[in-house]
Amino acid sequence: MRLTTKFTLWYFGIMLLVLLIGGAIVYYEIQWKISTVEVVRHQRLNDIIAGQIRQGGDYRDHPTRKRATVTVIPADSVPAGVSSYYTRGVDWNPEFQRDEFRLMVTSFYLIEGVQYRVTTYSFIPSFYQLLPGVVDSFKWILLVLLVLVVIMGGLISKYILAPFKRTMRVIQAFDLKQKEPIRLAQTRTSEFTELNQFLRKMTEKAQEDYQSLKEFTENASHELQTPTAIIRGKLDLLMESDIRDEQAVLIAEMQNALERLSRIHSSLTLLTKLENKEYEAKEPVSMSNLVRETLNSLDELIQMKSLRLDVHIEKGVYVPLHLALADLLITNLISNAIRHNVPPVGGTGFIRVDLSREGLVLVNSGREPRVPTAELFERFKKGNAGSDSIGIGLAIVRQICELSGFDIVYEYSEGRHGVAISFLSRVPASKLLQNVLVPLHS
């Protein structure tokens, strides 16, 4: 949910609560005000009637005679300290032939030694008669407020938060490989100014750290090549000299360890470049041609292990991926399927390759892995501890998929290893893999 939407909803909720409370206050305030005005008016009317009595006139000549009652009462029946009082209640209105809210004011007067009780009344709007008007007013106020809140939310998002949006666009386009510092627009809002200052410092520090790490990696990679080449050359010369069988075995083990070290170094360097996103897709790569070429180049290894190859390649499959990464991805997957392929008991090992516009699926026979298949994408994780693999191949494959936005899954079921890569975000890799594994099991 957008920040302006949250502000709008919170503001609208608070104003709704305020309006509800304010509506109740207005409702009761209007009713109280009407009652107060009517009480004062009737008290004045009672005074007028009492004045007519003092003058010897007939109050019944007054226009309100139908709603006025004058009664002579004993002097001791007047409540102590009370000159007038009023009562309210629902009563029958003969004029409109219905029950209405009646306000009655009673006043006491002592005229020429005689105690009079003067009572006048009138019908006034009740609570229930006022409520629809208050509710309608509340609805209109709420509607106007809602429109204003929506408009103000749009204006706030467009103008007040404009510097924040520009800053976000700059940060999204920021690349560690760029040498120039980021350029953030000036703003008069203090919070945005502080944010921009922090982002400048953070990005400058990240660029410095990246350049330092890159220089260290490049220097270490370069410096390791020289002693590695020297050691390899010395071992080759030593193998050509007059040595005993035991020494030859030790030298061969040293060469294998040196080759393993070289592969680890190359793989880690490649992973570092992938994590730093130094490979960018320039143009779509023909995965159809690439898979065929890789299978042709590894055909001798497939025949050497007597593996049955089942290939289903759709024509014209193009994927936006760097060519070097695409070649590395396909080569690693097919090489793993060959290297770790173990035929079932009494059967023949096989490799199945399915390529379509939706994705790539590889299934091969092999032993059950010693660790969960999800962990095999981690560095230096191997399905078989006795394998000569360095355990980085699948980590490189996963890093390429993450860099390219591909979904990848690895499963093992009933002697079959399956790896699926989905090129489309709407198609899960697990679905592609199941579409191939289910027919194989059946």
Image (spheres, rainbow, N blue to C red):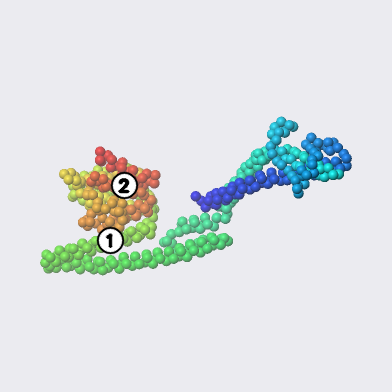
Query: Height in image: 400 above or below 107?
Result: below
Q: Toward the viewer: 121 or 128?
A: 121
The residue carrying mark 1 is: 264
Q: Earlier in the sequence, mark 2 or mark 1?
A: 1
Secondary structure under tag 2 reads: strand
**Rendered image quadrant of residue 99:** top right
Type of amino acid under label 2: Ala
- Residue 173, given in percent of the width and then of the height, sits at 46, 57
Type of amino acid under label 1: Ile
- Residue 277, given in percent of the width and then of the height, sits at 38, 57
Q: Toward the viewer: 95 or 166?
A: 95
- Residue 250, given in percent of the width and then of the height, sits at 16, 65
Which residue does the image show at 49% across and 58% down from the upper left? 170
Query: Height in image: 104 above or below 97?
Result: below
Which residue does the image show at 42% across and 66% down from the upper left? 208
Which residue does the image show at 65% across and 40% down from the upper left? 131
Q: Toward the viewer: 330 or 289?
A: 330
Mark 1: few, some, or many residues within 10 Å (few <14, many ≥20)?
some
How many numbered markers are drawn?
A: 2
The residue carrying mark 2 is: 420
Q: On the rendered image, what quadrant is the C terminus found in? A: top left
In the picture, measured across the screen, residue 308 lies left or right of residue 40, that is left
In the picture, measured across the screen, residue 31 lies left or right of residue 305, that is right
Secondary structure under tag 1 reads: helix
Residue most extreme to the right: 56
- Residue 287, given in percent of the width and then of the height, sits at 33, 48
Q: Toward the viewer: 18 or 236?
A: 18
In the picture, measured across the screen, residue 134 lies left or right of residue 323, that is right
**Rendered image quadrant of residue 359:** top left
